């Protein structure tokens, strides 16, 4: 029995190589590889040296200190996720812009349709009480496209936006400032401008006197007598005019000239023993002392002095 066990142990030892037997050839192989690499490094002209060096370097670079190759694809996946999120945000912004444009187009179409319905259904006419600018819309970006004269009837749609109302001019929607349309035709009154048609003329020094003559003559053509040059006071300086009129018509002319003093270059006005001046305009019409006669007290004419 002892011999039999000895035989089995001997056979086992023969069949199981020792660690030295395995490691020895591996060490020899590694040594030979290192020697070969060293030789080829010192002599790159040896055939196959470059390939061997490249593969050796690649193998060395591909193994970390722990003996495990690094996972370079982890960074790549992270970058791909970031790119995907950025692209998603850009696409969301593009979608938002497209939706905003579509909404603006829908609103524009709705406004056009509403305007067309308003123009077609307009059937009320109102009087303009003064000259009005015509605007393309009611908002701040509107363009001025002309004028509508005062005392003219215009179609209105009934639509209002802010301080403007919609009218129809030439079959198109236009907007004017609110507050200057009336159901009844306003009574006409004196206004600046116009032409003198009664044939009266004056000879004066100041150009303002010619303007006063023309505007009084245009609004009160029944007045044909005016006095300018005289030897005393502002008449002698060529900057005064007497409008020969009396009664309520005289007051209408005096008040009209007072209201437009700035445009006509007027310094002061005298009528019916009362005086109004720019310097003391806050006091209104002031009484004057009696000068002894109808003409001296200016009951039969309106006196006007200009600067």
Image (tube, grey):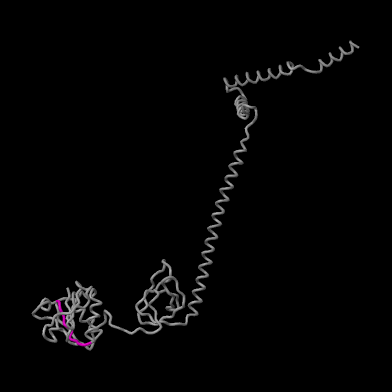
Query: Which of the image's four quarters has the C terminus?
Result: bottom left
- Residue 180, by quadrant, is bottom left
Coordinates of residue 45 in the picture (x, y in percent): 58, 23
Name above or below for residue 83 compared with residue 251.
above
Residue 242 lies within the magenta run: yes
Query: Which of the image's four quarters has the N terminus?
Result: top right
Q: How many marks?
A: 0
Pick the front one: 58 or 44: 58
Name above or below for residue 184 compared with residue 61.
below
Residue 249 lies within the magenta run: no
Name above or below for residue 275 compared with residue 40.
below
Coordinates of residue 13 in the picture (x, y in percent): 81, 15
- Residue 267, by quadrant, is bottom left
Name the residue at the bottom extreme: 222
Coordinates of residue 158 in the picture (x, y in percent): 46, 77
Range covered by the magenta-colored residues = 239-247
Q: Is 92 on the left-hand or right-hand side of 253?
A: right
Pick the front one: 175 or 275: 275
- Residue 266, by quadrant, is bottom left
Residue at position x 22%, y 81% in the image: 254
């Amino acid at each position: 029995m002892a011999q039999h066990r000895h035989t089995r142990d001997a056979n086992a030892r023969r069949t199981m190589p020792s660690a030295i037997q395995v490691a020895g050839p591996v060490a020899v192989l590694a040594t030979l590889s290192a020697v070969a690499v060293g030789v080829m490094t010192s002599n790159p002209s040896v055939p196959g040296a470059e390939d061997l060096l490249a593969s050796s370097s690649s193998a060395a670079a591909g193994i970390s200190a722990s003996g495990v190759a690094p996972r370079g694809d982890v960074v790549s996946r992270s970058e791909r996720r970031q790119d995907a999120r950025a692209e998603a945000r850009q696409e969301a912004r593009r979608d938002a812009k497209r939706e905003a444009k579509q909404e603006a187009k829908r609103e524009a179409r709705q406004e056009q349709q509403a305007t067309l319905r308003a123009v077609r259904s307009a059937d009320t006419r109102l009087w303009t009480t003064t000259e009005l600018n015509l605007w393309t819309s009611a908002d701040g970006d509107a363009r001025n496209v002309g004028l509508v004269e005062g005392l003219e009837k215009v179609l209105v749609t009934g639509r209002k936006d802010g301080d403007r109302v919609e009218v129809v001019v030439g079959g198109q929607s236009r907007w004017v400032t609110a507050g200057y349309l009336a159901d009844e035709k306003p009574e006409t009154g004196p206004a600046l401008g116009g032409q003198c048609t009664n044939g009266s003329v004056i000879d004066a020094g100041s150009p303002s006197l010619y303007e006063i003559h023309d505007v009084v003559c245009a609004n009160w053509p029944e007045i044909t007598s005016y006095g300018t040059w005289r030897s005393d006071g502002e008449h002698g300086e060529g900057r005064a005019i007497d409008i020969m009129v009396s009664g309520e018509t005289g007051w209408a002319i005096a008040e009209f000239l007072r209201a437009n003093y700035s445009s006509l270059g007027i310094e002061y006005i005298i009528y019916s023993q009362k005086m109004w001046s720019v310097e003391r305009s806050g006091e209104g019409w002031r009484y004057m002392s009696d000068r002894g006669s109808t003409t001296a007290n200016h009951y039969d004419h309106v006196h006007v002095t200009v600067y």
